[in-house]
Image: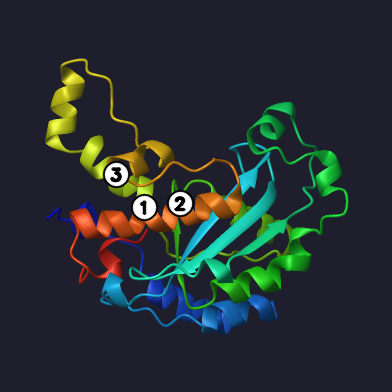
Amino acid sequence: MLIPRAIKEKRPGWADYMASRAETARDKRLRHYYGSWRLAPETPISAAPLIGLDMETTGLDESRHAIVSIGVVPFTLNRIQLSCHRYWLVRPPRPLNARSVTLHHITHSALAEAPDLDAILGELLDAMAGRLPVVHYRNIERPFLNAAVKSRLEEELLFPLIDTMELEAQVHRQSRWARFKALLGRQPTSIRLHGSRLRYGLPGYQPHHAVIDALATAELLQAQIAYRYNPQTPVGDLWY
């Protein structure tokens, strides 16, 4: 069984932060979201309500780019509630660029009637309420959502999450064996979503649709816990 690297590192006091924000958030949607948080760090991952979260954006820099779609899929280690998924197109405040359209196939015409993020924020937070988000590469979803909310409400939206890419990186990039292979000049093992799924025998899905990628991430975490972790692993050892 792999011992989570997170055990060796100090993690933010997320439970205290969420409780504090439930008292101090000015926007009622944010207060409701933070007030719904019940997960303590010692909660076993097998008992945690989870939600796969994915976004398509116009680029990788939240200070210059924007969200164009959001997908969420609620799940637990034992069950994926695909019928309860939610998907939103979001009109970006900045123009699309050709490269992003090529990746996610969301065009100007598709977004012409899409709402601003503020219009769907309550629905998104309701879907996420009480659930621990799971993403593949944490430098997209949380920073982009926080930047978008700050620009509209002048308040932060931060939350703990599990990063399935980081769990793969601990094995395939940060372990002693991975570093030894790198010294030998071997090609690094892919920790992208598709490549990570293939290692666990999971099927390949068409990438760059927010709901499909949220589902793919949820399935990947289920496999990671089954193969490399104990279901009794505390969420506080896995979240960032």
Task: Tell me: 124 left or right of 191.
Answer: right
Q: Are marks 2 and 1 in contact (CB under 8 Å)?
A: yes
Q: CA distance from mark 3 to mark 2?
A: 14 Å
Q: Residue at x 15, y 16 (%)?
A: 184
Q: In which quadrant is the C terminus drawn?
A: bottom left
Q: SS of the residue at dot 1?
A: helix
Q: Is residue 156 above or below residue 105?
A: below
Q: Nearer the viewer, mark 3 or mark 2?
A: 2
- Residue type at mark 1? Leu
- Residue 11 at x, y percent in the picture: 31, 61
Crowd around label 1: few <14 · some 14–19 · many ≥20 (10 Å):
many
Give the residue pinned by disc 1: 220
The numbered disc on residue 11 is none
Measure how far apart labels 1 and 3 are at the Cα level.
Answer: 10 Å
For the N terminus, the image quarter is bottom left
Relative to 183, 68 lies left or right = right
Q: Nearer the viewer, residue 66 or 21?
A: 66
Height in image: 173 above or below 93? above
What type is the residue that disc 2 sits on? Ala
